Amino acid sequence: MSEEEIEKENKEIAKAYKNLLKVSYTTLSDDDKKLIRKAFEVALDGHKDQRRKSGEAYIFHPLAVARIVAQEIGLDATSIAAALLHDVVEDCEEYSIDDIEQLFGETVARIVDGLTKISSLSKEQDMDVSLQAENFRKMLLTLNDDVRVIIIKIADRLHNMQTMDAMRPDKQVKIASETLYIYAPLAHRIGLYNIKTELEDLALKYTEPEVYNDILLKTKESKEEQDKYIEQFSAVIKKSLDKEDFNYTIKGRPKSIFSIRKKMVTQGVSFDEVYDKFAIRIIYKSDKQNEKFLAWKIYSIVTDHFRPNPLRLRDWITSPKGTGYEALHITVMGPKGNWVEVQIRSERMNEIAEKGYAAHYKYKQGAEKTDNLENWINRLQEALENPSLNAVDFVEQFKLNLYAQEIFVFTPAGELKSLPKGATSLDFAFHIHTEVGMHTRGARVNGKLVPLSHELKSGDQVEIITSESSKPNANWLNYTTTARARAKIKSALREDRKLIAEEGKEVLRRKLKQLKITLNESSVNHLVRHFKLKTSLDLFYRVGIGSIDNAMLKDFAASRNNVLVSFIKNKITRKQTISKEQIDKDEITSNYDSLVFGKEGEKLDYKLSNCCNPIPGDDVFGFLTVSEGIKVHKHNCPNALSLQSNYAYRIMQAKWIDSSQQEYATEIRISGIDHMGLVNDITKVISNNLHINMKSLSFETDDGIFSGKIKLVVKNKALLKKILDNLKKINGIDKVSRV
């Protein structure tokens, strides 16, 4: 670069820095300005020899991120300084975290450290999905340290998306997919709606450029028409608003390109057929006391002139969203027979809608209620506190909390609780407290007993019935939608499985002793291979629940004695895939390679994808292709991010059925001679067998002869046989048969 170009660039850098101070949402004190100046100088020194792919000086990037943090998100001087320094430790050898702490204090150092941890993985080349998920996991875990880490990371991602033109096309698509997958939903959930919209539009620009450019062109062409329509709409209500002495502004908000595209796809319509391509926003001045009253007064004026759609009223003033968002949304029939969404907000509400976190704190006073964002972060930390989750599960679970619409339900005492839309009575139990969830026996909604899977609606009053003897079972995962409940249930099931496995290990030790075999590492490995299992825990668990019995262990002992037979058998097993018929003969692996889809567990035709080659037992999902039906991919497939990000509507839940986890419904018929206490004897036998769920019981007697039906849910045939044998031993019972 020539001296003239360097001088010109230095002027641009100085201009960007001055602009940063000028546009800050918060009022900066002299100390704040000194802190920001110091951070700018360290960033300038650290990045002095670095350039971006576009060729411009690297310092423009941290300056731009700091501007987004200061102006669009509205954070404080500490955050602005951290944004300026966010790449210094990662990219510059001269500065360490200790140096940052000495220069700027503990808080700035903690935020920069959180951002550095995230960046270190995101710069890996050719990152696969599990690494990417691990990267997200690190980022989400920084919620424990400081929420500002996440917010600055979103600002960093926004600027990267705005300046991605110089990158390779494949990199552009990859970064755009990640943005749609996690960063846009995250911005939405934190309340940064403007940034979320921009991230989605920019992501679409790179993932579907033709679609993006087509919609962009059409929105520009229709802008004049929209402006005219907004003017026409406003003219009708202005007179009434002026008459009431409102201090207000009316403006149009065009729908984002991404949301127009989404509507075109989900509703199967063309651009011209998307009727609500814009909303009208009425922003009024008010003191805090009169906000609600004035909002409903404006609602009354609007609905005096335009007929409202009663199903499309959203009152987020009485019950704000989890992000703190407040507004009144109504959809009315506007001029020319078009539906128009009208958003009514005070200036304070509008600032919170645009700045979220920062504005909420600006308007927070004294002992006002705990911030909704803090509540959300606390709930999120509880939901994700299980460290044993793998990274992909962790991110998937986290995403359950994102984009979730809310419902509001009441406790028996009348306390209002917010839950994601689609939440069940079991989700509500875990929302109240983990211990309540763990011991849930049933629920009453509006005074009526309902199943645990009952989906709650806004306004429901929910009472949870608990019992010390109740504990989670595998079916509970089908009854829950929230990340917190699912994490707690999975954790409890794992603990339960471990306890059964511990009992099973002792049982196995005794049984093997009778067969003159010692339980040690070698014999356990032989048993695991013999029964085609994955781990010793699987082996001990199956012994614990009785699906590996004495006869099977005798077969194992016999095959073990014949080393040659065992050797040949293992060779054959390695060389060929086990057929369905062979698996059905072996009870412990019954249905193990069967794949089911959706919550209902339907069996559908599918193909295994070549990109990740899933095998029975892998965590998988189904992807509905255009011409090849359902293709099954692993959750950590290299293509998973792309598929999940861009084609979420084609993704189907899928799982392999493992016989040890599968439960079977069955019916037993009993007949014999009636006597006092017979029913008690029968129920004792059944309840003394672990892992049995009795669904129904009915008996009839006729002149001293009885007949009965019992419906049970059992894990395997071995357990059912044990029950049948024990029932036959009861005095007076003549016949016991399975229907």
Image (cartoon, grey):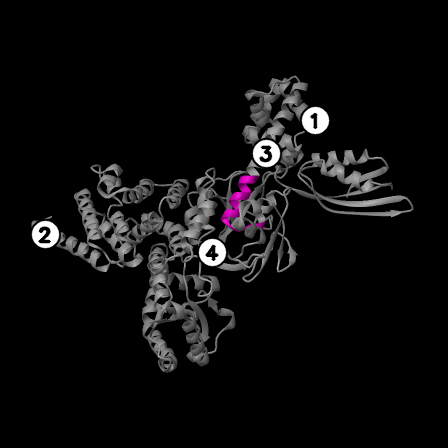
Circle 3 residue:
578
Q: Give me the C-alpha separation between circle 4 and circle 1.
A: 51 Å
Q: Amino acid at mark 1?
A: Ala
Identify the mark nearer the N-term, 4 or 2: 2
For label 4, the SS is loop
Q: Give me the C-alpha separation between circle 3 and circle 2.
A: 73 Å
Circle 2 residue:
7
Is residue 573 positioned above or below 99 on the image? above
Identify the mark nearer the N-term, 3 or 1: 1
Q: Which quadrant of the rendered structure holds the C terminus?
A: top right
Point out the frontmost of discs 1 and 2.
2
Q: Is residue 484 magenta?
A: yes
For label 1, the SS is helix
For label 2, the SS is helix
Q: Amino acid at mark 2?
A: Glu
Q: Give me the C-alpha separation between circle 1 and circle 2.
A: 87 Å
Circle 1 residue:
551
Position of 381 with respect to 226 (left or right) is right
Point out the frontmost of discs 4 and 2.
4
Circle 4 residue:
404
Point out the frontmost of discs 3 and 1.
1
Q: Give me the C-alpha separation between circle 3 and circle 1.
A: 22 Å
User: Residue 143, position in %: x, y?
Assistant: 38, 46
| Residue most extreme to the front | 366
Name the image quarter holding residue 117. Answer: top left
